[in-house]
Image (cartoon, rainbow, N blue to C red):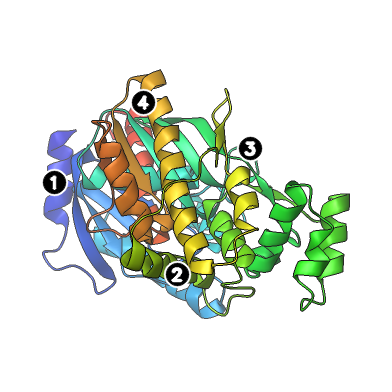
Amino acid sequence: MAGLACRRTANLRMSYPDCVEHVIPLPNTVPPVLAMGAWFKNTLCITSGRQAFISKGVGDLDTPAACLAHERTARSLLDWLGTKPAAIAHDLHPDFHSSRFAAQLAAELDVPLIAIQHHQAHIAAVCIEHGVMEPVLGLALDGVGLGTDGTAWGGELLRIEGVRFDRLGHLRPLPLPGGDRAAREPWRMAAAVLHESGRGDDITRRYTGEPAAATVAAMLQRNINCPRTSSVGRVFDATAGLLGLCHKMEFEAQAAIALEQAATRYIVAQGWPQALPDGWKISSDGELDLLPLLAALAEIQDAEQGAALFHATLVAALADWVAQAVHRTGISSVAGGGGCFFNKLLAGGLSEHVAAMDVRILFAQTLLPGDTAIAPGQAWLSSQQTLLINPCV
């Protein structure tokens, strides 16, 4: 196996193709695998020997131009590799262009097609950057990723060991009134919090400027077009909507950015507030419920104070969640991945809390915490699966 991998590596041209942006070392020697990434901020990754070659960003796969660029990048990486990959990996979501094109390429090349769960890939990407092979707890916090149960995940506590993962816990799911539209209009997520708190009648009074307020209130009451999600990203949106910082987004993550900026202004001026007592609950089956915090924030008039209180309580809640998992599993390494870790208050505050527990926490280094790192995570996991099936690959 090692000799074959060395020959493969030797066959790679010394110069990388223009589409490659990062080359990162891997913890061990792997077979060549092409990973197709996800939907947002798409990148691709190909492995050979002990290296992963990660493409430049293709962008969100929501336009014909981006989809064509994705396909060209995939074929360029395969041409450059000069050998048939052992497998092609893709996101668990079957309707992404990256997943559909992965299936097309796998059929063309007659190689296995491997689906990788989104949040498992996030954590794997962090682990390979740090050369970590032992079991870890994975804290995956982002906007959305399809879960193995067919629902929208995004606030996940995972146990990762090799190619296996167990979902130890998740955030209490909130409804998405209007489906994907709720991810673009934070006031809808705020309305969902009011409904879940038993205050559905407040929706139309609080959001009188939204023509759809009465409709959204009725949708929530009747549970029509309100799929649920455990996403932390939507919790950020709900908070921004409750505090009046952002009702509708004009660009991606606008609500979360506004929330972080408001909290930063307060913390710079007055320091971190104390976390809200009883602002969260953790059930026996590992569900983290932030509804007590969100319900309290609905009553706060000072948006900056509310934003700071949100961050302080969220950090404390996540640290408590991790501490309980460390106690149950005996695992003292935590990997944090997902776009929510772009938030410096969240990442920095959580690092301080976890360090005080004598637990190691790992974040992205060369790679970013968001979806640009999905492809290397997919590549690593699928290469390990391939080795398990056929150690001689």
Quadrant for the C terminus in the image: top left
Write the residue at 24% across / 38% down. 355
Percent coordinates x, y for residue 186 in the rendering: 63, 66
Write the residue at 57% across / 22% down. 284
Are the residues flagged by discs 2 and 4 in contact, CB closer than 8 Å?
no
- Mark 2 nearby-residue class (10 Å; few <14, some 14–19, many ≥20): some
Write the residue at 65% across / 58% down. 298
User: How many numbered dots are placed on residues in this image?
Assistant: 4
- Mark 3 nearby-residue class (10 Å; few <14, some 14–19, many ≥20): few
Percent coordinates x, y for residue 239 in the rendering: 58, 60
**Mark 2 or mark 3, earlier in chain:** 3
Query: Can residue 158 be spotted in the picture?
Result: yes
Q: CA distance from mark 2 to mark 4?
A: 32 Å
Q: Nearer the viewer, residue 54 or 33?
A: 54
Q: Which residue is mark 1?
A: 7
Q: Is residue 119 above or below residue 163?
A: below
Q: Which mark is residue 262?
A: 2
Q: CA distance from mark 4 to mark 3?
A: 25 Å
- Mark 1 nearby-residue class (10 Å; few <14, some 14–19, many ≥20): few
Q: Nearer the viewer, mark 2 or mark 4?
A: 2
What amino acid is labelled 4 in the image?
A: Val
As drawn, is 109 to the left or to the right of 153? left
**Mark 1 or mark 4, earlier in chain:** 1
**Mark 3 or mark 1, earlier in chain:** 1
Q: Which residue is mark 4?
A: 326
Q: Which residue is mark 3?
A: 149
Are the residues flagged by discs 1 and 4 in contact, CB closer than 8 Å?
no
